[in-house]
Every structure is written in C-alpha cells, then in structure tokens.
Amino acid sequence: MPKFDFALTTRDGQKVDSIQIYGKDLPDAERKLRQMYHHCQVTQCRTVSHEKELSQSADIEDVLSLIVKQD
C-alpha cells in the first residue's frame, strides 16, 4: 500500500508540514486525512517512495544476507 505525504493548513490557519498516510490511492489517503483534519486545505501532496520495503516474512537467506552485510 503506498504512503502519501501531505502538507496542509488547518481550518484555524496552522501549517502542518508533513503528515504521512497509507492509502490504496490518493483519494483514499486524502479521505483519511480529512477524517482527522476537517475543513483543511491541502497545500502539497507527494507519494513517498519505498525503495526497500521489508516484507512481512523473511526467509533464512534474507536474514543471512543482512548479517553478512553488517561486517
């Protein structure tokens, strides 16, 4: 699931520089954002790239390669 980074201005005028939210797509992430910040104005949005995402499970070869790389 991609992660989106939002910058926004709250309805009180306070600026929030970075809020990262997971979503299926941009509209889904923005919907979640607006549940937390009602009537906010989104000033910037970008997709956060995951170059090396760790999977939920790792096999023994992955673990051994991490141990070897530390030396």
Image (cartoon, grey):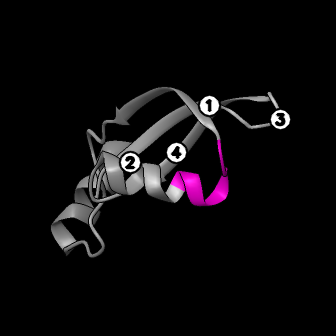
Please state which of the two labelled residues, at mark 3 or mark 2, is closer to the viewer: 3
| Residue where numbered disc 4 is placed | 20
Closer to the chain start, of discs 1 and 4, is: 1
| Image quadrant containing the C terminus | top left
Query: Which quadrant holds residue 63?
Result: bottom left
- In this view, 44 is above or below 30: above
The residue that appears at 59% across and 60% down in the rendered structure is 35
Q: Earlier in the sequence, mark 4 or mark 3?
A: 3
Numbered badge on residue 8 = 1
Q: Secondary structure at mark 3?
A: loop
Magenta region includes residue 38: yes
Looking at numbered disc 4 in the image, what kind of residue is underneath it? Gln
Would residue 34 be counted in the magenta stretch? yes
Q: Which residue is mark 3?
A: 12
Residue 65 vs residue 27: left or right?
left
Cβ atoms at labels 4 and 2 below 8 Å apart: yes
Q: Which residues are magenta?
A: 33-39
Displayed quadrant of residue 17: top right
Q: Residue flagged by tag 2: what amino acid is it?
A: Lys
